[in-house]
Amino acid sequence: MNKNIENVFLSRLKTVVDEFETKKLAAQTAGITTMQLDRWLSGASNPPFKGLGALCERSDKTLDWLFSGKNISTQIIDIPRHSLKLSAGGGSPVDRVKFVDNIPFTCEFFQKKLPYTSITNLMIFDAAGDSMLPTINDGDLVMIDSSKNEIGDGLYAFTIDNMAHIKRLQQTIDGIIIKSDNHELYDNYELKFEDQNKIRIIGKVVWKGSLL
């Protein structure tokens, strides 16, 4: 997160916490310890949506105010969309990544679908290509959680040699197996152990959708 934006967010979070009689009560409301709350307030730890939602429910502030400074009754949260295209194919060159627009989501979406995700770690990109069919279509929007950069189950956005990809990754003792879902047209391939420093994990795919 941009440092200036982070400072504004932390200032608003402190305002919400200050509405509680004690910091201990605020921490209990968020379901954490006072030590964890201090880490949130200092910026040392990114608070998940569920905890922030609990704090706002007990105060006179909305989640939308917390993130944007606006009080909107429907509580819409904007997730930034960037110009980088994640290739579900042979790879897309990583040029200078620019902000494109914001994609709005309701707070209810995060409460139900991604309750333990920190909003500040989320970003949206366009998918391009057919190697991840039928899971991801050409032109789909994919939401990436940049805090999830350890390889496990699921789909990941990553770069290799300045080319951006979206694939399944499997860590082995010999390296990393890079998998496509469209097995008819694309084979899996392996990044050897000695070449693993070539890969940079952008984050894990936590949602995909389409614009009409």
Image (tube, grey):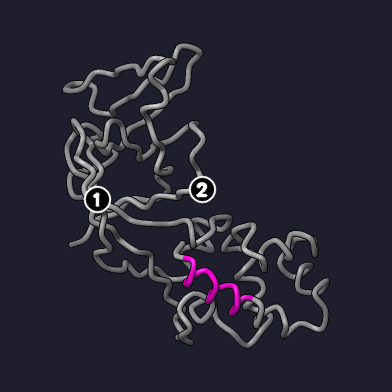
For label 2, the SS is loop
Q: Is residue 73 above or below residue 77?
A: below
Q: Which residue is mark 1?
A: 84
The answer to whether residue 12 is magenta is: yes
Establish if 114 lies above or below 179: below
Quadrant of residue 156 in the image?
top left
**Which image quadrant for residue 179?**
top left
Q: Nearer the viewer, residue 70 or 154?
A: 70
Query: 137 and 159: which one is in front?
Result: 159
Report the span colored magenta. Answer: 3-13
Q: How many marks?
A: 2
Determine which residue is flagged by label 2.
Answer: 147
Residue 67 seen in render: yes
Residue lying at 51% horizontally and 56% vertically, measured from the top left: 114
Q: Is residue 165 magenta?
A: no
- Please give left or right for residue 111 compared with residue 40 in the image: left
Residue found farthest to the top: 174
Q: Is residue 120 left or right of residue 130?
A: right
Q: Amino acid at mark 1?
A: Leu
Q: Secondary structure at mark 1?
A: strand
Q: Earlier in the sequence, mark 2 or mark 1?
A: 1
Q: Residues within 10 Å of mark 1 (few under 14, many from 20)?
A: many
The residue shown at (37%, 52%) is 143
Measure how far apart labels 2 and 1 are at the Cα level: 18 Å
Inspect the image, locate mark 2, and give the three-letter code of the amino acid beneath it. Ser
Q: Quadrant of residue 83?
A: bottom left
The x and y percentages for residue 94 are: 23, 43
* Residue 101, numbered label: none
